[in-house]
Amino acid sequence: MTSKLISTFLAAALAAAMAQTTTTTTTPDPATEAQRRVNRLAAELNLTDAQKTSAVSIYTAAITAAQTIQTSLQTNRTSLRTAIKANDTAAITQLSTTSGTLSGQLTAINGRAEAAFYALLTTEQKALYDAAPHGGPGGPGGPGGMGPRGRRRG
């Protein structure tokens, strides 16, 4: 399960970071994003009010921590495009390595948040959670993306 979560969160983080480089829409603040995620999870898992409060705190902190890294990834991608156009292979190598490090940091932030949330769940809730597809902040539940339970939104 751990490798599945890591893979899912890495993909979601990279997709969110790429989406930020191609759109100019304003993203909601971390607390709003966290609340949306918790609302979706609460509906699927029947969370208690105490679990909801803790989950909002966990996800708000994770989203806030990820914002700086996502900005760095966006800057890194711009620099990488410049290096590619200049055929600067040394810069391409260095920027690619940096991109991997930043992506790893996002994976760690998301993984720690998911672990903290998972620890809040009852045995029954864990069974439901384990059976459902997941995405990190900005992942499959986002507009036009995969909805809850992995179904495509129309």
Image (cartoon, rainbow, N blue to C red):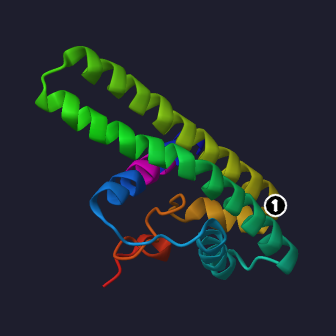
Characterize the magenta stretch by its predominant secondary structure.
helix
- Can you name the residue that lies furthest to the bottom here? 154
Which residue is tagged 1?
Answer: 120
The magenta segment is 9-14
Q: Nearer the viewer, residue 14 or 118?
A: 14
Q: Which quadrant of the structure image shows residue 132?
A: bottom right
Residue type of the residue flagged with mark 1: Leu
* Viewport quadrant of the N terminus: top right
Q: Position of residue 119 (x, y in %)?
A: 80, 54
Q: Residue at x 33, y 52 (%)?
A: 18
Classify 10 Å Cα crowding around label 1: few (below 14), some (14-19), many (20 and above).
Answer: some
Q: Using the image, determine if residue 61 lies above or below residue 56.
A: above
| 33 sits left or right of 95 in the view | right
Q: Which quadrant of the structure image shows residue 40?
A: bottom right
* Viewport quadrant of the C terminus: bottom left
Q: Residue at x 63, y 44 (%)?
A: 109
Q: Does 25 appear in magenta?
A: no
Helix, strand or loop at mark 1: helix
Q: Position of residue 41 (x, y in %)?
A: 64, 73
